Image (cartoon, helix red, strand yellow):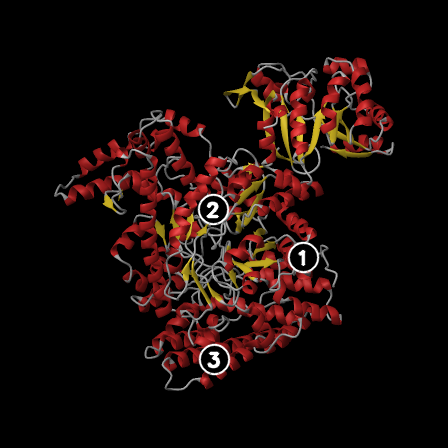
Amino acid sequence: MEEYLKAKGRIFNIQRFSVHDGPGIRTIVFLKGCALRCRWCCNPESQKGIIEEMEVGGVKKTVGEDVTAGEIVEKIERDRVYYRRSGGGVTLSGGEMLCQADFSAAILRGCKEIGINTAVESTGFAPFETIQKVLPYIDTYLMDIKHINSAKHKEFTTQPNELILENAKKIAKAVNKLIIRVPVVPTFNDTEEEIEEIAKFAKTLEGVEEVHLLPYHNFGVDKYKGLGRPYLMGDIKTPDDEKMQRLMQRVLKHGLKCQIGG
Amino acid sequence: MNKVYTEFIEKSPRIPLLVDALFQKMPEIEVERAVLLTESYKQTEELPIILRRAMAFKHILENIPVTIRDNELIVGSATKTPRGCQVFPEFSYRWLLDELDIIGERSADPFYISDENKKVLRETFKYWEGKTTSEFAQANMTPETLKAIDHNIFTVGNYFYNGIGHVTVNYGEVLEKGFDGIIKKAKAELDKCKVSDHNYITKSAFLKAVIICGEAVCDFALRYSALANKMAEKESDPTRKQELNKISKICAKVPRYGAENFHEACQSFWFVQMLIQTESNGHSVSPGRFDMYMYPYYKMDMDKGAISREAAQELLDCVWVKLNDLNKARDKASAEGFAGYSVFQNLIAGGQNKEGLDATNDLSYMCINATLHVMLPQPSFSVRVWNKTPHEFMIRAAELTRTGIGLPAYYNDEVIIPALINRGLTIEDARDYNIIGCVEPQKSGKTDGWHDAAFFNMCRPLELVFSNGVDNGVQVGLATGDVTKMTDFEQVYDAYKAQTEYMIELMVNADNAVDIAHAKRCPLPFLSSMIEDCIGRGKSAQEGGAVYNFTGPQGFGVANMADSLYAIKKLVFDEKKVTMAEFKEALENNYGYGIPDEEVQNIVVGVAKSLAQKGVQLDEGQISELVGKVKAGSNGKYDYLLKLINEIPKFGNDNEVVDSFARDVAYTYTRPLEKYRNPRGGRYQAGLYPVSANVPLGKQTGATPDGRLATTPVADGVSPSAGKDVSGPTAAANSVSKLDHYIASNGTLYNMKFHPSALKGRAGLESFVSLIRGYFDQKGSHVQFNVVSRETLRDAQKNPENYKGLVVRVAGYSALFTTLSKSLQDDIINRTEQGGF
């Protein structure tokens, strides 16, 4: 095995046959650890870098497993035939794959070298030098832009957005394809104006053509319970179709492609 | 090259009317056929059986009621009432005699029968004692075989109680030349016979029988022509009057003469399809490559501008409705195994032609439309897939899948064609295969495939290993030794193989006994007239007249046995965490989860029997004490073992070690079978599919070392055990594809259950198609889908009245969910639902 594939890292799930996170049939590798604490996060078990316990259906389950990049690449390769038929591949998600940039880079490189299409779902929240480690091996960068107003961004995610917006510009220049994704979260960013602001920004990014609007859902609520943590979103409902359509119009207006959902 | 028309075509308003009329009442058993058959048989006792069959067929067709239902364009009904069923006492009648009073009440596939008709049947059946195929077959089985059947190791019930069916005749020949052509062929062959030929007596009788049947069928069509004419005279609606006049004209022409347009072809097809199922009650009479043999007539009309696409679609839809008008009553146990009133008429579209070119045409797409229009379980609609199948065809098929109807089933040319060549078919014949019944491939018009020859429960031999061949106190299997004294895994595995091979021998004995019974007592001259080379050889298909002859008994429970044997290997011999003795005890006690009453009864009876053999008689008090002792489970005692079992990898999760184990376990059934021959001069070939028998036969299966509790369903087909494939559909499909699908040339069946959300939008369809393609790239043979949410199914269980039309995929076929028994409904709900996120 190549030396770089021995890089170790921490993941908490591998989900095969995912059809909502990048083109075609994909395998999603969920990495542990994230610098943000988005209130609506549906994978709260992903946030801390540590191995922890979560109760699922009354049973305690260990969340987090240390593995090598080589082991992951081997698992990813098992579905190569489906990637080939569907134009799919691997997507690194999390958590935030930039929190384990060397490990992520090793997985992505390993995949590229055997001809598997790569994508990442990322906040883009890291020093650009860190991002540069993974950029050479990424076909599609799915990047969240959650809000243009930094104060509001910080209020809901615990981090300001300047670094993210700055990185977005650099990533846009460097990567093959950048898609901007917006979690549409009521009380946070679901007004037409707020979404349009994001669309305007996306339009300024070199080569960006596509925006995905992801309606908030509360599927993560049980996980908060399982982790013994409060769920801060209360009983906020998923934005309805009609609303999502209106928001989509605001994006389309700027000459961008737009879809609802991943 | 012609441009293929792939678009959806709107449904005619006639179709919902026809569909609604089918489902007004509970299906009914009618008695005319049984009465007429018996009348004829009583008058022909001196004749050779083949002529008796032909005379009886003729007598039935001359006198059975003819019925044209409202709004029909394609006519011909086996019964006066929709979805009714006739009775076929020549195969077996005792079950019906026993069940006459309960058949209207039972949970699986009830049938109404009037008191008057019950009386008629009781009277009619008196003639048949000692004359049926089932009695003949039973008399020819060895005592060991009967014992194995009695102990539910395998069942040959399907052909034991019924006709064979499982055939696709040469519809194309009838469409082209009519029965006039077939009669001419038989006469020409008869002219060639010399009275001094060694086979003159049997051959001339057969050919005469063919001619009688051909004439009878043509005359039967004339009765419909006359009826339509009479109805037209009375009809006040001018449109309907015109339709009836047209029907009258068409029935005066086909099937005697060749069809010259699409409507005639549809009508001619239907007479053949229905009458095969009047001659015998064998199910899985499969239309096969309908889009291929009907295409010339469609094209002729389209080229001339004689028919609109919509009108052609309407005719096609009418044929689809008629396929749901046929029904079959089975005994209670079989009804559970084939639940859903299904007659498994498999119709397949797409695929390559004899020359190896893709032959998908307009009709292939219109077949998809027809199923979308009628949304009924018949025909069992299938599509053939190969590397050059048009992508759009796959997408249109996936759209049909998305409706949740469980259709179509997808079949892989890239596996099936070489598998058939390996069985001796020519490459041209192999390329022209279609599917019979559930999943069984054959070349139409040339094959007597006997595809549903038996169910072999692969779990039972392992039970026999643990009991040293004893079942309920009786030595049924081989004495393979005390399992607790076995010192390495190979000994256990060898014992399993020995038990399996012994049971396969007995099963072959049973099948061959049934096979000969059909040749001797129920040869089918009408059916045989449409199968090459029966006329040339001068004998019926049942006597070996067909070019290709097979017997295909199917095994099921591969996943359970793979997981079970792997658990034994790993826990007992590799890791030494438990002993064989512990395992044996846990299995005997159903892992501490109590023993079902039925099983308690069996055990007690077994003990009492073995004591009786030693001269000890138990009184009632002793028996009830024994029952109490057997019943006392020790709940929780074996939970540690279940936990250990649960933790080891299972088949269906793309685990190299377990999957190759499964491949080998499947070979323990598929390989030994290959060496056997049947009485028609053909070979045995294994299938790996259960129809829906995994549920009722699971009830007869004790706890298995994979942690499966006694009496719960066994894994269906080649699918992983329900709920054990937890790594998603690609991983499960990878595992299943690692089995050798080529050797199981009687078909393999892989069930996947999808949540509707996984097929949302064009992107969802694209991914879905890619999943099928990916599975087929890895040489899986068949896959089918249930696309319906668990919540929907649960709600349908609670409120069946709201879900009368809900069709689900059961096994190699679809059925109305609400007509299935509760336990089968539960099994379907429990099959892993993939992509539900």
In the picture, measured across the screen, residue B491 lies left or right of residue A261, that is left
The chain letter under disc 3 is B
Where's the N terminus of chain B, which quadrant?
bottom right
Kindly identify which numbered label has been placed on residue B211: 3
Q: Which of marks 2 and 3 is nearer the N terminus?
A: 3
Neighbour tally class for label 2: few under 14, some 14-19, many 20 plus, Cα within 10 Å: many
Where's the C terminus of chain B, which quadrant?
top right
Neighbour tally class for label 1: few under 14, some 14-19, many 20 plus, Cα within 10 Å: many
The residue under label 3 is which amino acid type?
A: Ile
| Percent coordinates x, y for residue A184 in the rendering | 75, 25
In-front residue for pair B36/B546: B546
Q: State the separation of the CA atoms marked 1 and 3.
A: 37 Å
The residue under label 1 is which amino acid type?
A: Tyr
Q: State the separation of the CA atoms marked 2 and 3.
A: 42 Å
The residue under label 2 is which amino acid type?
A: Gly
Kindly identify which numbered label has been placed on residue B717: 2
Viewer-side label of 2, 3: 2
> In this figure, which residue is indicated by the disc labeled 1?
B365
The chain letter under disc 2 is B
